[in-house]
Image (cartoon, rainbow, N blue to C red):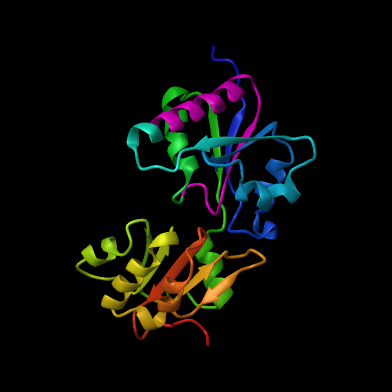
Amino acid sequence: MTPATGTLYGIGVGPGDPDLLTFKAARILGRVDVIFTAASAKNNHSIAVNIARPHIPEGTAVRRLSYPMTRDPAALHAAWEAHARTLITELEAGRDVAFLTLGDPLTYSTFGYTLKYVKAAAPHVRVQTVPGITSYQAAAAAVNVPLVEGEEALLIMSGVKGGDRLRQLPVKPENVVFLKSYRNVRGIAGAIEEAGMLENSFGIRNCCHDDQEIVRDIRALADMPPHYLTLIIAKRKGQNGPAQ
């Protein structure tokens, strides 16, 4: 008989406002034994922990897992595998574990990659994913603009490679969200302009944080110093654009 294990909770902490955590996420954070979060190999800082901090009881163990900021597959796989083993060790000791992620844990999330390795190495452990509010939902709410209406389509894509993926699409959807825009705003702006969506686009930096900034001119956004928490929402001409 397989011994009882703890439960792994993948928890989305939302985009930045601690009040946007779900009741379920807050309840789980109040009773788990260990909380893990991803951190850059360059530092120990965790935005996700800072967001969730009001919901974490004093004395709860919080551990940061260092992930390399690289596109080297070997280095990434090694980190995912090593951290999956760390989680499994805690779970097999009978401890409940939470893994915090910005936004939603299954949307462009480190948790999603690590989860694959946990499930492969220890298919017997219990896993429960708690969805979180995404940054693009919060961004649309901040500007009071519908993401989609009627029969429109919404494309959510990574901006890591600029606007190349949008350019490759033979048919452009009415609404596009670029996450992970960071250093690639200029390339994204070019692709959005080519698609006839520039005038109905806007960017948000630090969505739901105290220094949130809404930028209604993507060309101006491209001239700003890059900021890690930057996203862009673009809409085809004739669709509901950002409120003026």
- Looking at this view, is 108 or 164 the one in front? 164
- x and y percentages locating residue 52 in the rendered image: 68, 49
What residue occupies the far left of the structure in this picture? 170
Give the side of residue 27 with respect to residue 88, left or right.
Answer: right
Q: Name the residue rendered at 70%, 31% in the picture.
A: 33
Q: Is residue 38 magenta?
A: no
Q: Quadrant of the N terminus?
A: top right
Asked if the magenta segment contains residue 101, the reply would be yes
**Residue 227 in the figure: left or right of residue 149:** right
- Classify residue 113 as left or right of residue 90: left
| Nearest the eye: 52 or 162 | 162
Q: Position of residue 137 (x, y in %)?
A: 52, 65
Residue 173 appears in the picture as rendered: no
Instruction: Identify whether 244 is placed above or below 193.
Output: below
What residue appears at the point 75 percent right and 50 percent down from the top-left corner?
54
In the rendered view, does 11 fall on the left or right side of 233?
right
- Taking depth in this image into account, of 96 and 80 the one nearest to the observer is 80
The x and y percentages for residue 217 are 45, 80
> How many discs appear?
0
Spot occupied by residue 136 in the image (x, y as percentages of width and height): 49, 64
Which residue is outermost to the top? Answer: 1
Q: Residue at x 67, y 66 (%)?
A: 210
Instruction: Give the quadrant of residue 165.
Output: bottom left
Magenta residues (range): 77-106
Residue at image x 44%, y 69%? 232
Q: Is residue 138 visible?
A: yes
Judging depth in this view, the residue of 206 and 121 nearest the camera is 206
